[in-house]
Amino acid sequence: MSEPALPSTPPEAIRGIRRETVIVKGRTFLIERPDESDRMLDHPRVKSELLDRDFMPYWTDLWPAARMLAKWTVEREWPAGLHALEIGCGLGLAGVVALSRGVRVTFSDYDATALTFAARNAKLNGFKDFDTLQMDWNHPPQGLRFRVILASDLVYETRNVSPIVMLIKRVLADDGVALVTDQDRIPAALLKELLAREGLPYKTQMLRAGEPGGDRLKGTLYRITQPGGRDPLA
């Protein structure tokens, strides 16, 4: 039996588009996202997806953990030839910043419209060497392997944690690293538990990020590798 079609936020639910200037360690990036995202949730098809799949289009916001991962990414020296998969990419900020560091990026998300915005933002910042992939974490394509996985603010519900851990275990190359940022939400305890249970080594680092002039929020970066694997960024 084939898997059901994956969701796509209807274009007519988007009331307008807002362009934001995002400053990451002195570097400027442009990010476009739906305006009035709260009103978008009132659209009948969006409500239907919530009832049918328990799916909410949280991708429309620029979350603090995305800024944390973007900041960490722009500070690193990246080896040549790396290809990263950003999971749950939403607006694609972390992936766009990775592109600016010479990394090839595949943006992936559950929602096709999110991928449209991620691709739009990559092009808006002058990048062309990227791909998009609509994907359910529970059913990734066979043979999918990456040396770098990027993920930000995905551990916001307990039900997300196991699929994310199992996806990392399946997709991360033996000589790869998964970079996961979280705003220290309650399900982070389960993330640590499941990483240990699946034998995936990880290191943590405290991060802070926020909007210019606003509060700087604390979070955690998880650097996850395969058992016996080598972190290409170490």
Image (tube, rainbow, N blue to C red):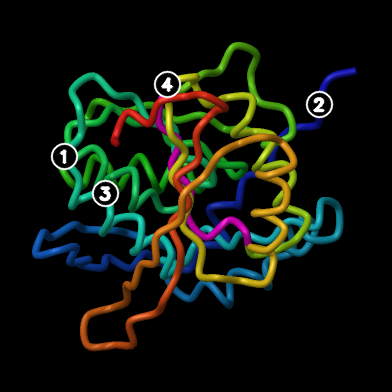
In the rendered image, residue 29, in percent from the top left (x then y), is placed at 18, 57
Q: Residue furthest right?
A: 1
Res. 230 visible in picture = yes
Q: CA distance from mark 2 to mark 4?
A: 31 Å
Q: Earlier in the sequence, mark 4 or mark 3?
A: 3
In the rendered image, residue 117, in percent from the top left (x then y), is placed at 40, 48
- The label on residue 3 is 2
Res. 136 visible in picture = no
Q: Earlier in the sequence, mark 3 or mark 2?
A: 2
Residue at 44% across / 32% down in the picture?
85
Kind of residue indicated by mark 1: Glu
Figure check: 81 above or below 87: above
Q: Is residue 191 left or right of residue 98?
A: right
Figure check: 39 above or below 4: below
Residue depth check, mark 2 versus mark 4: number of the one nearer the observer: 4
The answer to the question of whether label 1 and label 2 lie on touching residues, with beta carbons closer than 8 A, is no
Q: Magenta stretch?
A: 147-155
The answer to the question of whether label 1 and label 4 lie on touching residues, with beta carbons closer than 8 A, is no
Q: Secondary structure at mark 3?
A: helix
- The label on residue 73 is 3
Residue depth check, mark 1 versus mark 2: number of the one nearer the observer: 1
Q: CA distance from mark 1 to mark 3?
A: 9 Å
Within-10-Å neighbours for mark 4: few <14, some 14–19, many 20+: some
Within-10-Å neighbours for mark 3: few <14, some 14–19, many 20+: many
Q: Earlier in the sequence, mark 1 or mark 4?
A: 1
Residue depth check, mark 1 versus mark 3: number of the one nearer the observer: 1
Figure check: 102 above or below 163: above
Q: Which residue is mark 1?
A: 77
